[in-house]
Amino acid sequence: DGGITQSPKYLFRKEGQNVTLSCEQNLNHDAMYWYRQDPGQGLRLIYYSQIVNDFQKGDIAEGYSVSREKKESFPLTVTSAQKNPTAFYLCASSLGQLSNQPQHFGDGTRLSIL
Amino acid sequence: AQSVAQPEDQVNVAEGNPLTVKCTYSVSGNPYLFWYVQYPNRGLQFLLKYITGDNLVKGSYGFEAEFNKSQTSFHLKKPSALVSDSALYFCAVSVHNNAGNMLTFGGGTRLMVKP
């Protein structure tokens, strides 16, 4: 079955530590996205990538980094510079740059501070 | 800049009754509108979209939504609610531009269907 796989499901970060969230898709989608979800605030865009080896900052990119070395993979690193990383992180993909295409979501990674 | 408002944090309905979850939007240009549903500790699932054409859009699980251009609204509806419809619902909007497929989400509405 085609879909988006996020791992791990739960992740704990220590003070000063960088952690990396994995996102893999086998939908052959060109575009991929990372969102942060906090209670009562909906989804906010962290980074997006429309094509391999290219990515753009979203609304809340500070303290995060990404890479897009392969079409199917878009890992997100939460750096120690992100002072409030506790949140639910969602990865999504879409067929391309067309705005009328729905985004497909993984089941998320819940990040907490130890 | 585009924005989406979901004015109700929570909607309560009895099983078997009709339900409506409200959404209004603000964009420059013609909107593409989407509804997603989220169950606890899961990602968002696509329900339906409006691109163009008929203002009444039918989607998954018996849901439908009505696009109203003059009121800039895209309310989600279902004729008869099920307890299993209880979840968090998000409205989202995008516009056709060179920036790509960029969605703006509303804050979400929690739907509670009671037996």
Image (cartoon, rainbow, N blue to C red):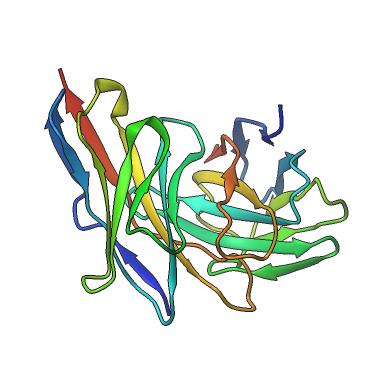
Q: Residue at x 74, y 58 (%)?
A: A66
A55 left or right, relative to B37 = right
Given the current orientation, which residue lies at the most extreme top position? B115
The total of numbered circles placed on residues is 0
Which one is in front, B94 or A111?
Answer: B94
Residue B5 place in picture, x, y as percent: 28, 63
Write down the quadrant of residue A21 in the picture: top right
Q: Residue at x 48, y 59 (%)?
A: A44
Which image quadrant: the C terminus of chain A? top right
Q: Residue at x 41, y 41 (%)?
A: B59
Residue A89 place in picture, x, y as percent: 56, 45
Q: Is residue A99 above or below residue B96?
A: above
A49 left or right, relative to B37 = right
Which one is in front, A15 or A34?
Answer: A34
Q: Residue at x 73, y 64 (%)?
A: A50
Write down the quadrant of residue B25 in the picture: bottom left
